[in-house]
Amino acid sequence: MSKPGADTLIEVDEDFPVDMPDGTERIAIGSGVIDGLLGTGGMARVYRIWNERLEIHRAIKLLVPSDRAQSQERFETEAKITAKLRHPNIVEIYSVDEWNKLPYIEMELIDGDTLEAFVKRHGRLPASVCAAIGVLVCRALSYAHIREFQLYGKTYTGVIHRDLKPANVMITKNGVVKLMDFGIARPTQAGLHTAHGKIVGTLHYLSPEQIDGLDIDARSDIYSFGAIMYELASGERTFPDNAITAVMRNKSTGTYTSLRDHRPLFDAQLADLVERCLHFNRDERFATSKELLDALDEIFRKLAGGRNPEDVLCDFINDPESFNESGDEIVAAKSKLKQIGIVLGSVAVFVAVLFALGSLSGGSIHQKHVVATVHHEITNPPASVEAKNVSVGSAATTSGSSSAKITTPLPESSAKESSNKKQVSHDVKKQNETVNSLASMLAKYGGVSPLDAGMSAFDRSAWNDAATLLAAAPAEPRTTACLFVALVKAGRNDEARAVNLSGIKDGLVELSSARLCDANGDRESAIAHFQNAITRPSILADRATIMDEALYG
């Protein structure tokens, strides 16, 4: 651990006044008026607006107020990059401007669902549907990865999305797929808006090289694409949330459940393609998204029988039951007449079989129903056991003896006075013990104040002593951060929960918060803090230490 210098401050976000539309008022913005709130993120809010002159709905992405220049730079970069990517499978931008000094992007409104919501509704998808979605997303990627464009006066070839995930892919009711949210995208040749040692992206879909803070190229997007495809095929994330350290460790070694184990009848070629995208060694993945698209196109044509991806998706949206669960092929009839013929034919065969079985068994037919059910059971660890308060000075009473001495109880006022004296005596004793303990620890760690001694104990990983000393030090951001980390390390979770971390942004603090949430069985919050731990800088520990703790701590 590295000790913060006296002039080093942990990054603290000051409260910034947020006065944004709530989506219910018809406020004029862009080419229309607000007609509803579509979504809210950490960086922006997205509204639906109605353009009366054109009689169409559009979407407005409005930047959340912030005092950080980098947020505005990224927002502006997203608008510039997306506006230059004109492709049927990439969301289209119409204009940029400001509302009440807040920048916004006006774009096409996608009438549909995110891929994330799509998978939640349908579960794992048939192979032909997986391939159809994959082809359309990959068309957008292969275009973006080679597109030549100008940005801030320089010419670049290709852009890396860097945040591919199901939440950033939309599917319309007509089977059209749109890639969106280029908020952290950057040209392939430049580390635009990327601070040294800081990771951007979403943990579950980050490539191993992104997590390691290495230079990335288009193959990082290919890895994220593979993680999306795995989720479509299996209905689960490649690296589930059962333990946050396991997520990191398994990513770094390429350890996950094979698609064949999830779905033995899933198309073997498509499974091989997905797992090649997910290889932890980027040299073993597809070299380019064009190479990936060519391979995926060939598999899709075999599965879809010459139909286009949009038609396959549209058919699935309209009638999911018409697709074989194994995903090998579409079993929907081409017409209602053919469907009726199949049903009638099946009934005739079934009646014939029943008749034959009845004849052979003397009219007794024994039916066996074998139902295969897949169980995904997530066992949350129990919340940490709270320490029980032990009352001090309680009276013990003995009974059951014939010779027991009977005494007259003291008057109520006398009893209360006696109890109060005992409590005061106990409190004084505890206070003296604390003073003596602090004095002993000050001598032990050679500090002239609880802060100095506490930081010395912190550097020596003496977590209990560090927590006790820092709790007695004046509160300030770095002291509070170190106190919180020490309490979590010492297993004093109930005390750690009481620490006010408002505004403190530090990687090691986030990792400790993740551990605390994980101990409580709160997986969603644990993953969110863990994501912050590997994407935020820290003055309490270097990045290598945080990564090592994330993997093995």
Image (spheres, rainbow, N blue to C red):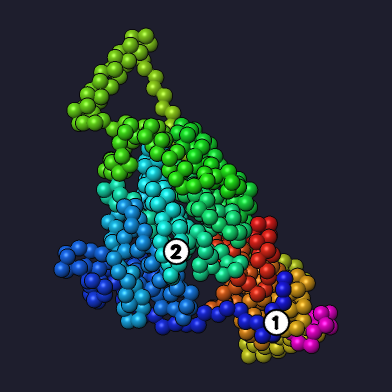
Q: Which quadrant is the C terminus positioned in?
A: bottom right
**Which of the marked residues, 1 or 2, is nearer the chain's N terminus?**
1
Asked whether 291 falls inside the magenta stretch, the response is no
What percent of the width, then of the height, locates residue 262?
A: 50, 38
User: Image point 21% across, 31% down: which residue?
Assistant: 335
Residue 289 in picture, x, y percent from top left: 46, 47
Pointer 2: what residue?
Answer: 155
For the stretch drawn in magenta, the main secondary structure is helix
Q: Which of 25 and 213 is in front in this view?
A: 213
Q: What residue is drawn where x is 48% and y is 78%?
A: 68
Q: Where in the figure is residue 119, as x and y percent of width and height? A: 39, 48
Circle 1 residues within 10 Å: few <14, some 14–19, many ≥20? few
- The dot on residue 448 is none
Q: In which quarter of the image is residue 300?
A: top left
Judge from the rendering whether residue 255 lies leftward or rightward of residue 453; answer left or right. left
Specify start and end residues of the magenta stretch as a single range: 441-450
Horizontally, is 427 left or right of 494 in the view?
A: right
**220 w.r.t. 484: above or below:** above
Q: Quadrant of the N terminus?
A: bottom right
The residue to which callout 1 is attached is 5
Amino acid at the residue labelled 2: Thr
Observer-nearest of 109 and 462? 109
- Say if 248 sits above or below 44 in the image: above
The reply to whether callout 1 and callout 2 are in contact (CB within 8 Å) is no
Q: Is residue 431 visible?
A: yes
Number of numbered discs on residues? 2
Label 1: which secondary element: loop
Residue 442 x %, y %: 80, 83
Nearest the eye: 479 or 83: 83
Dot 2 crowding, Cα within 10 Å, few <14, some 14–19, many 20+:
few
Q: Which amino acid does label 1 sit on?
A: Gly
